[in-house]
Image (cartoon, rainbow, N blue to C red):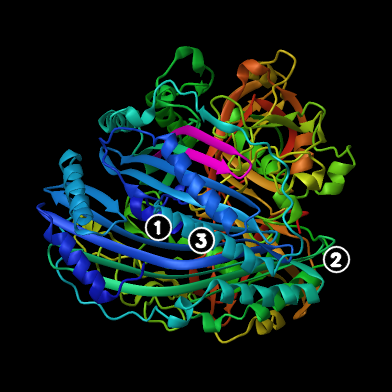
């Protein structure tokens, strides 16, 4: 399904446009169909057909991905179920190198002839493209793992929870929001299960079962008289977990001016507090533009990390492969080579990690059969590394790939995608409350909202869900119409405090778009609450007519 | 074969409907064939061919609806998908907003399909790319681009006798050229139903001239400026507004189309008198489907007429609730232009900025439709009717609604594509006063 068709499925109108990038493919499956995986022995047989066919046609390297992708989306508003989408997409993608060039073809007909034809087509496309090649593909060596497997460590498979339980939960959440004062409430549950089998001519046969879940809502309060309206979105995070994320646990709540959530979410509680907060937000004073010290909660900071650190450290962007769409990067190779490019203050340590438990990006092996790992991107404020895949590793002198390769589906060609990129917690004991005590003029921002950054990742503007004004070390009330603008390097150099690991939480993007044709991937970003000094805040209020 | 003729689609859909035992049944078929090439650093990076054919069935008992889809087309599979939709309908909660299906409708024939585009091959795509890369190499630039062609059809039929069919073709092309030093960048984007209109060579020449022309950009102070938005920039900005031409969200009090005191802004003078925005599926430059997803016929409809809100879309449910006729969203969007070329718009500008492209536009405030984003790939300072020098990119915070109140002049309409959704629009270059830039960007 093309992304532009998605709104047709969800019947969502304005206000939910942030969700318009959600892709959906596949045929529907019954809501009560039992969850299962395909026997690995069958997948190995199918993969071998493709590997042998491609080799026979002259491919010097081949990888095969057999994917069974399950999506379940439950979409409600107020007391109505708008849509329940339950889809399965099953097929095979074959990627080859022939004449030094990449070729790719995919098929959902998994009989011997169709697989062999797809392998032949992939080789033919590689040969066709080779005429416009400037240099042959150079693939970093990768040992074959033999037959191995990996599973997301879930406690309860969300696909095995009855649909009725999910619908009842969302309608209960909506009811709680309306009772607490919201006029409108849209709520969603997004479930993804990727059953991926990877085989390559390097000798790997990798079976993986990957789970992700995202509960989300947006509530709206209107004032018919003035025509004013405000909304407040969920403070949940999309996670690489099972249904256990939906079962609240007191030890995973951070009680403060707003309750915040760690490894478990309380959707009913958040909807109730959100409806109360929206009333306060509507009456809040409009921010005075100027310089403020910002205290950014992890429910907000994840998106700033994603846009200003995650994307510019992707090597394909640095090299120009994304120039025609998302853009390039200001973190050019000379800055990395200098070993002293001052990305941020000395407090700033940022790691890439494809192994973090509970994260969206956690897998055992990436989509070109590379075992996953963790590595430094920014060390004590200095740029030290990028994110690479096999055909890029040699460019920065790495002996092997870091395992950042991903494809949205079996019918999409895999390419470099962002690992989980996270700000490491402060080493000194420090709580957000202690941090606020030291701020004279500041704003405490919770939740993510509007986000925009230039094509080389210098200039950005972000806003949040809740803004609390800090004066002389105390929160004095809510603000509205806040957005902050900064230059990436100046912003990270203004980082003057990071709370300790007891405050560390994950946020993330369930549908991060990249590439042409666009593919989405899911990625988490962790941090503790952090302080940034004297950031430029603008007022976003305008008037029509 | 993923593309079925009208007759083939009708036979298949009739067979599907005949399997149904539900109160109401609707079936839709869609198929597409096409391919793409992506290139960067003056060489192809990826390429693919895609072909899909899909059948979706909705069955309804009372107000309970279930949907199912399948991509297998033997009789047993067709019956299976109908039974599955019926089972799901029995399990589904009642939808109080369900509307009974429409009976047979009259549709005019669309003009959306061109055989030339359907005939494209991996080789012809590679040829188009080779032309673009050669221009880039000659200009000593690095090209990154994308070409994608698709041929598709959609058909729906229901148990009340409605049948609709549409076949279309589309080709999109976009190209970014950058110099080795990374100090200049230019862009061009094209979209057509007919690939014969696509000239990747001249489009790349435009991108190349913007790339070379943008070297040595100077910083100017952010603030309010007169700007000329070229069609590709104006399209991306306005696309965010078109989605809001919806009565329900306005009536519910949560849209820029909501009226203080309740209701919507229908009939209100919301923009400058020069602004006319409409949909017309028979426009020869931007033909589109002649029926909506729920089977309503589409014809020309004005959304904004001389700056007044003339129509808002009403879904069948919302129209029924409000006691008005349903108004489907249009299948294309056209903004009326004027006679002037972009060069003439520049000539009549004392001081201003020419914006080639906008980037990363996101909603800041739904209340006023305030958007933020940045200029990209060629931003130039105009003085006394001439382009004086390239300027550094800037971030803006501006509402398209406020912007269309500040229209100075409209140029000649051009077909253009949105750089994010790849949808095609007909939009003129627009000269606007008091466009708000809020900060400088170092990005090239």
Residue B191 in view of the camera: yes
Whole-percent x, y for residue A219 in the image: 40, 38
Q: Nearer the viewer, residue B40 or B423?
A: B40
Q: Secondary structure at mark 2?
A: loop
| B391 to B78, vertically: above or below | below
Q: Where, quadrant-wise, is the N terminus of chain A in this rendering?
A: bottom left
- Tell which circle, 3 or 2, labels the residue nearer the N-terminal end: 2
State yes or no: residue A504 in magenta: no
Return the residue at label 2.
B216
Q: Which numbered mark, 3 or 2, is in the foreground of this view?
A: 3
Q: Nearer the viewer, residue A5 or B230?
A: A5
Query: Which mark, residue A5?
Result: 1
- Give a yes or no on whether discs 2 and 1 share a subunit: no
Whole-percent x, y for residue A304 in the image: 65, 39
User: The magenta stretch spans which residues?
Assistant: A196-220
Alpha carbon of mark 2 to alpha carbon of mark 1: how far? Answer: 42 Å
Alpha carbon of mark 3 to alpha carbon of mark 2: how far? Answer: 31 Å
Whole-percent x, y for residue A309 in the image: 70, 40
Q: Nearer the viewer, residue B373 or A44?
A: A44
Q: Nearer the viewer, residue B299 or B104?
A: B104
Residue drawn at 79 percent across, 69 percent down: B141
Q: Secondary structure at mark 3?
A: loop
Return the residue at label 3.
B421
């Amino acid at each position: 399904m093309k992304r532009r068709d998605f709104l047709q499925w969800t019947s969502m109108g304005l206000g939910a446009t942030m969700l318009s990038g959600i892709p959906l493919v596949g045929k529907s499956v019954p809501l009560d169909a039992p969850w299962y995986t395909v026997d690995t022995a069958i997948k190995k047989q199918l993969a071998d057909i493709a590997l042998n066919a491609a080799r026979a046609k002259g491919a010097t390297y081949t990888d095969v991905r057999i994917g069974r992708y399950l999506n379940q989306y439950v979409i409600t508003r107020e007391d109505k179920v708008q849509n329940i989408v339950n889809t399965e997409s099953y097929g095979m993608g074959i990627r080859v190198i022939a004449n030094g060039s990449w070729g790719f073809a995919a098929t959902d007909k998994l009989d011997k002839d169709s697989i062999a034809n797809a392998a032949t087509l992939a080789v033919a496309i590689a040969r066709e493209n080779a005429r416009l090649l400037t240099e042959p593909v150079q693939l970093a060596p990768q040992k074959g793992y033999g037959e191995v497997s990996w599973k997301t460590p879930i406690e309860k498979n969300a696909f095995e929870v009855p649909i009725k339980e999910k619908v009842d939960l969302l309608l209960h959440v909506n009811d709680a929001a309306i009772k607490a004062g919201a006029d409108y409430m849209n709520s969603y549950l997004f479930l993804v299960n990727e059953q991926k089998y990877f085989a390559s001519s390097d000798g790997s046969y990798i079976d993986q079962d990957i789970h992700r879940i995202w509960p989300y809502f947006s509530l709206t309060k209107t004032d018919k008289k003035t025509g004013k309206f405000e909304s407040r979105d969920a403070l949940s995070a999309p996670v690489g977990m099972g249904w256990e994320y939906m079962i609240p646990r007191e030890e995973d709540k951070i009680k403060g001016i707003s309750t915040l959530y760690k490894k478990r979410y309380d959707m009913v509680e958040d909807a109730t507090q959100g409806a109360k907060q929206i009333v306060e937000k509507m009456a809040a004073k409009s921010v005075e533009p100027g310089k403020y010290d910002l205290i950014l909660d992890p429910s907000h900071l994840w998106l700033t990390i994603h846009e200003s650190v995650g994307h510019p450290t992707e090597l394909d962007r640095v090299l120009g492969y994304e120039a025609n769409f998302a853009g390039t990067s200001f973190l050019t190779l000379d800055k990395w080579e200098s070993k002293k490019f001052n990305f941020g203050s000395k407090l700033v340590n940022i790691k890439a990690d494809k192994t973090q438990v509970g994260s969206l990006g956690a897998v055992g092996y990436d989509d070109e059969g590379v075992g996953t790992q963790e590595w430094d991107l920014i060390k004590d404020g200095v740029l030290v590394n990028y994110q690479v895949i096999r055909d890029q590793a040699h460019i920065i002198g790495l002996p092997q790939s870091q395992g950042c390769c991903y494809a949205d589906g079996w019918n999409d060609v895999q390419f470099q995608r962002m690992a989980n990129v996270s700000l490491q917690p402060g080493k000194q004991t420090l709580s957000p409350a202690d941090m606020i005590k030291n701020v004279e003029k500041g704003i405490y921002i919770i939740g993510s909202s509007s986000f925009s950054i230039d094509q080389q990742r210098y200039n950005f503007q972000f806003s949040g869900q809740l803004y609390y004004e800090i004066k002389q070390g105390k929160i004095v009330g809510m603000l509205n119409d806040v957005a902050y603008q900064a230059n990436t390097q100046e912003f990270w150099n203004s980082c003057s405090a990071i709370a300790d690991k007891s405050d560390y939480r994950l946020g993330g993007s369930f549908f991060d778009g990249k590439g042409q044709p666009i593919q989405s991937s899911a990625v988490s970003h962790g941090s503790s609450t952090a302080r940034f000094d004297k950031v430029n805040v603008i007022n976003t209020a305008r008037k029509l007519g | 074969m993923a593309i079925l003729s009208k007759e083939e689609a009708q036979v298949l859909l009739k067979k599907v409907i005949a399997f149904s035992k539900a109160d109401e049944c609707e079936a839709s078929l869609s198929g597409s064939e096409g391919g793409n090439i992506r290139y960067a650093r003056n060489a192809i990076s990826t390429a693919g061919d895609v072909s899909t054919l899909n059948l979706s069935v909705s069955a309804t008992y009372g107000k309970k609806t279930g949907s199912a889809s399948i991509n297998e087309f033997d009789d047993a599979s067709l019956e299976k998908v109908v039974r599955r939709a019926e089972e799901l309908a029995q399990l589904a909660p009642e939808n109080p907003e369900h509307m009974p299906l429409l009976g047979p409708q009259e549709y005019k024939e669309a003009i959306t399909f061109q055989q030339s585009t359907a005939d494209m091959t991996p080789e012809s795509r590679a040829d188009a790319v080779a032309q673009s890369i050669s221009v880039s190499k000659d200009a000593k630039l690095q090209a990154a681009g994308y070409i994608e062609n698709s041929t598709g059809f959609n058909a729906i039929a229901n148990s009340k006798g409605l049948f609709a069919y549409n076949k279309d073709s589309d080709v999109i092309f976009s190209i970014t050229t950058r110099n080795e030093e990374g100090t200049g960048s230019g862009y061009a984007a094209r979209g057509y139903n007919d690939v014969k209109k696509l000239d990747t060579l001249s489009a790349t020449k435009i991108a190349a001239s913007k790339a070379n022309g943008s070297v040595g950009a100077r910083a100017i102070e952010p603030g309010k400026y007169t700007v000329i938005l070229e069609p590709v920039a104006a399209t991306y900005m306005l696309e965010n507004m078109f989605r809001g031409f919806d009565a329900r969200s306005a009536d519910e009090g949560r849209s820029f189309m909501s009226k203080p005191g309740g209701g919507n802004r229908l009939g209100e003078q919301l923009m400058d008198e020069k602004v006319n925005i409409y949909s017309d599926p028979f426009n020869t430059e931007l033909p589109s489907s002649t029926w909506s997803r729920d089977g309503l016929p589409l014809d020309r409809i004005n959304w904004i007429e001389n700056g007044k809100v003339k129509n808002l879309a009403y879904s069948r449910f919302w129209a029924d609730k409000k006691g008005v006729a349903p108004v489907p969203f249009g299948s294309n969007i056209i903004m009326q232009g004027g006679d002037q070329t972009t060069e003439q718009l520049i000539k009549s500008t004392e001081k201003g900025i020419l914006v080639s492209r906008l980037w990363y536009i996101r909603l800041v405030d739904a209340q006023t439709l305030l958007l933020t984003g940045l200029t990209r790939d060629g931003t130039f300072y105009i003085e006394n009717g001439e382009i004086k020098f390239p300027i550094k990119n800037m971030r803006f915070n501006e509402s398209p609604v406020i912007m269309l109140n500040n229209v100075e002049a409209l140029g000649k309409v051009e077909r253009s594509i949105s750089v994010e959704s790849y949808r095609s629009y007909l939009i003129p270059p627009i000269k606007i006063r008091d466009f708000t830039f809020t900060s400088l960007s170092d990005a090239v």
